[in-house]
Image (spheres, helix red, strand yellow):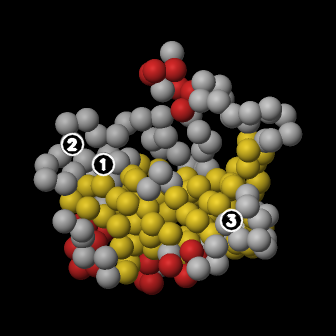
Amino acid sequence: MILSDATLKSWLKSGKLICEPLTEESVQPASIDCRLGTHFLMVEDFNMKSIDMDSEVKYREYEGDTITIPPHSFLLATTMEWVKLPDDLTAFVEGRSSIGRLGLFIQNAGWVDPGFEGNITLELYNANSLPITLNAGRRICQLVFCKMDQVADKPYRGKYQGQRKSVGSRVFKDSEAK
């Protein structure tokens, strides 16, 4: 069941769901809009020949209120909002239609597990032939919350728990990589 704006407001007010700081326009009919933060990572492609899943990827870090994504380029960004989901709620991360119409694809693997808490790292790809300039504080994505049928047996407590900035891939820490 997808949560409505009335339920989202109730859960936010009670503290069952945390998503802050919020603006009044953030709560939509069936989602919460999140804004672009000020921390960004780009793959350090000058010092690597390729990316593999068994090695840590090197990133260049940027901090600022504005960033321009070159055409056909990828970067990691973060939301301004800190999110804390209860163990019986999950969220889908979706790009806003108005942003997608600019040719900016927004992802975060599309999913926030029950029990997650932290700022959400977003994967941004400029599919356009022109650069796209982004400003911190602008609504960039939305979270659609879905109530689970019961509390998760093993809620998320993983390698991205508590992140405050954009966090690069930690796939090299997966159990099958050892």
Sequence-wise first label, 1 or 2: 1
Give the image location of residue 140, x and y in percent.
56, 72
Q: Residues within 10 Å of mark 2 (few under 14, many from 20)?
A: some
Location of the N terminus (image quadrant):
bottom left
Give the image location of residue 2, x and y in percent.
24, 68
In the visual, does 159 lie left or right of 89? right
Circle 2 SS class: loop
Q: Residue at x 21, y 51 (%)?
A: 88
Task: Check if mark 1's residue and mark 2's residue have beta carbons within 8 Å.
Answer: yes
Asked where in the image residue 18 lies, by quadrant, the reply is bottom left
Q: Residue at x 70, y 50 (%)?
A: 41
For the residues labelled 1 and 3, the Cα–Cα distance comes to 29 Å
Amino acid on which the number 2 mark rests in the picture: Ala
Asked where in the image residue 69 lies, by quadrant, the reply is bottom right
For the residues labelled 3 and 2, the Cα–Cα distance comes to 35 Å
139 over 151 or under it: above or below: below
> Which mark is on residue 126?
3
Amino acid on which the number 3 mark rests in the picture: Asn
Circle 1 SS class: loop
Q: Residue at x 44, y 56 (%)?
A: 110
**Which residue in the protein does label 2 denote?**
152
120 over 48 or under it: above or below: below
Q: Nearer the viewer, residue 86 or 101?
A: 101
For the residues labelled 1 and 2, the Cα–Cα distance comes to 7 Å
**Which residue in the protein does label 1 denote?**
114
Task: Check if mark 1's residue and mark 3's residue have beta carbons within 8 Å.
Answer: no
